[in-house]
Amino acid sequence: MKLGDILALKGGETLTVAPQSSVAEAIRIMSRERVGSVLVSTDAEKLQGIFTERDVLNLIADKGPDAAEVTVGEVMTRDLVTASPATSVDETMALITSRRCRHIPVLDDGRLVGMVSIGDLVKAKLEEAQHEVESLREYIHTGY
């Protein structure tokens, strides 16, 4: 299964904030939407970074109560880990493991087309395994 298959099922909608948005605004969006990250972009296509729960923790540890006044652009993760719609789920899981991240923006020719999380990948692998088990059971019950 490829990331394009996952995006076809879940949709390519992503949450973005502008780099000049306050951290407080980004946190409100993440809380309201129940997500662990938002992408940082001025046009919702070209990425400038990603703002994650980990960025929030690091900021609070560094700035304390003044953290909410900082802009997202000041503290976002700039070293993006990305994949393409043609990237396999297995390749993406290896990437997430090696780079220790939980969200992967999906780019097609440099244009944002969606984002997958570790949860999306685990769900896809579970569905794949269930389908394989069902196929094997059917094969066994039909007598080779």
Image (tube, grey):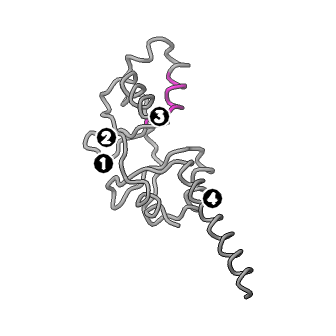
Q: Which of the two labelled residues, at mark 1 and mark 4, occupies the earlier sequence position?
A: 1
Mark sitting on residue 34: 3
| Magenta residues, start to end | 51-59
Q: Are marks 3 and 4 in contact (CB under 8 Å)?
A: no
Q: Does dot 2 land on a helix, a strand or a loop?
A: loop
Say which residue label 1 marks. 46
Say which residue label 2 marks. 41
**Mark 4 and mark 2: Cα distance apart in space:** 32 Å
**Mark 1 and mark 3: Cα distance apart in space:** 23 Å
**Mark 3 and mark 2: Cα distance apart in space:** 20 Å
The residue depicted at 35 percent of the width and 48 percent of the height is 13
The residue depicted at 74 percent of the width and 87 percent of the height is 143
Q: Which of the two labelled residues, at mark 3 and mark 4, occupies the earlier sequence position?
A: 3
Residue 29 in the image: x percent, y percent? 39, 30
**Of discs 3 and 2, which sits in the foreground?**
3
Q: Quadrant of residue 68?
A: top left
Residue 131 in the image: x percent, y percent? 62, 68
Residue extending farthest to the bottom is 144
Q: How many marks do you count on the picture?
A: 4
Q: Report the front residue among 34 and 106.
A: 34
Mark sitting on residue 126: 4
Q: Quadrant of residue 39?
A: top left
Residue extending farthest to the top is 65
